[in-house]
Image (tube, rainbow, N blue to C red):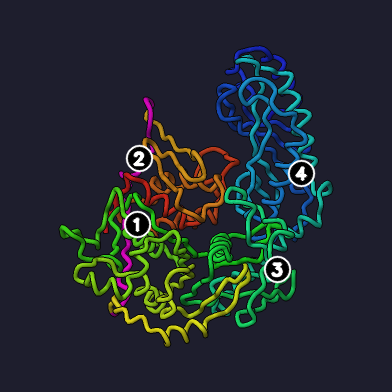
Amino acid sequence: MKTAKELRPELLRIDRKPYGFYKEIKGRYDFGTYVLNLDYIQPDPFAPPSQVAVRVSGKTAGFPPALLDSLTRRVALEDCLTRYFYQQAQKVGRGKRGTGHSGLLAIDKPSQEVLMRTAMVVRDEWVEARFVIGLPAWGRRISGREASEIFFEEIPELVQRTLIYSNLDGDLLEKYVDLAEDAEFIRARLSEKGLMAFVGNGSILPRVSGVDDRPLPSDAAIPFQSPPELEVEFDCPHRGPVRGMGIPEGVTLIVGGGYHGKSTLLSALEKGAYNHIPGDGRELVVTVDDSVKIRAEDGRFIENVDISPFIRNLPLGLDTRVFSSPDASGSTSQAANIMEALEVGATLLLVDEDTSATNFMIRDERMQSLVTKEKEPITPFIDKVKQLYADLGVSTILVMGGSGDYFDVADTVIMMDEYLPRDRTAEARSIAQSYSTRRTFEGGETFGRVKDRRPIPASFDPRKGKKNQARISAKSINSIAFGKHYIDLSQVEQLVDISQTRAIGDIIHYAAKNYMNGERTLREILDLVEADLDRDGMDVICPYLKGNYARPRRYEIAAAINRLRTLKCKD
């Protein structure tokens, strides 16, 4: 390891030289209070910025052990420190100085959710921040003096402001970790109360806009209040008693007029699989870990999925037990999305009528009379949703505004009325008895089988370019470039951060190299990958340190694998 005193003359020596000379400063430097690791040096000022890490000893950082004595608390602490660092980097860094990314000083920007990230890693022995800098240049000539300002003025100031506990707001840090622990406490006890989700009283569910996930200002939003019939209480370790609406296991309908908050509630439940930051408004919206949002997805790729519980007897004799399509319809894609979620362990399906295929959701009496079952290959969801719970223990929360036929299969009916929930289960049952639909049940005696597929490793090839090297990158939160192909995740609605998408691309490559052998099922592969992530962290998926990963759920990893158009599977 070199000393900080050796870095300054090196920067002056290469001043004004071609940009490639920056590679000579790669390495580790002892700055006394911390160690600076220049892990990746960008080849030119327009390339992705240089990867940098600073590590402070646990003794110097001084964080109380109580802030990191469980995984939940440690992840929340790391998340909070990342936010501190992001805010302070904008204040301390002087900004662009020169060509391309010159002068950039930044860390992975967090979303509203608390995620396990590689940007900040806290251990008992040390605290490490991983961030990027744009090594300064004018044209393609090194600006060593401005680089010195970054290394000897801005980074030391950032370390003092963000990684030394005595310089931080200890009360805020404690609030972050306590909130995360309370949310996990509720999530761990949902099943004890027979629940799939909980929405705390006083929650602010609406967001600023469709592209801004911050909460709507409290003076413009109606705080959530549970109907008395569904109100439950959790005695949290830090907040104490917390009351709110519990959504039971089974089949739950969310109904109501247009613009009364149905989809807003469902959207909050989708994101309730994650913990949230203080002040988000959805801090106490908690959903089971294994929830998956289901929708129709016209045009998606499908490989060897058994959709026969929903669709049989297609024209031309196509076997729906091994259904594949490069361009699926709305109904076949929605059926495949359900079966793929069940394949990897989903226990709760979240469905919105507005994003579903109508012919997949319902066939009323008149349509059944005109188009007989012999001529209709689709068994609608209404005839399978009860069997999902009875046979597989999988619950469904469904937003429905257009068909009262679902009253016949609902265990719970919640009506949103001017953004407030009302329990209308009894009224819905009474209506169902008074106004019989007289439609014919088409679901059969059981739900049907959920098939395990075995991915073939040769179908995962990330190589691209003249050098035939692996090329994997997240082009946006909704798109992964995997070799010569793109994975479209635009309809995978529970992704919340581009850093998750970035991690998914590399996780797929890691899984293909280490665990796909043509014999292991997709579920077994995901189990092995998650065990590695639990044990070794996300650093295991990349040969060098990266500070811009956020941990995805297994369901989004599976969704990406299923949408890779080169995927081949066997039963």
Front-most of residues 248 and 109: 248
Q: Nearer the viewer, mark 3 or mark 4?
A: 3
Earlier-in-chain disc, 3 versus 2: 3
Marks 4/1: CA–CA distance: 49 Å
Which residue in the protein does label 2 denote?
461
The part of the image, by quadrant, that contains residue 374 is bottom left
The Cα atoms of the two marked residues, 3 and 2, are separated by 49 Å
Residue at the spot 38% in from the left edge and 59% down from the top edge? 337
Q: Amino acid at mark 4?
A: Thr
Magenta residues span 445-467
Q: Secondary structure at mark 3?
A: loop
Mark 4 or 1, nearer chain start: 4
* Mark toward the viewer: 1 or 2: 1
The residue where tag 1 is placed is 330
Foreground disc of the pair 3, 2: 3
Which part of the image, by quadrant, shows the C terminus?
Answer: bottom left
Q: Nearer the viewer, residue 225 or 558?
A: 225
- Amino acid at the residue labelled 3: Gly
Mark 1 or mark 2: name the one nearer the start of the chain: 1
* Res. 273 in view: no
Relative image position of residue 293 (x, y in whole percent): 47, 61
Mark 4, residue position: 162
Distance from disc 2 to disc 4, alpha carbons, whole Å, reads 41 Å
Q: Mark 3 sits on what residue? A: 202
- Name the kind of residue labelled 1 in the image: Gly
Lower sequence index among marks 3 and 4 = 4
> Which secondary structure dominates the residues rendered in magenta?
loop
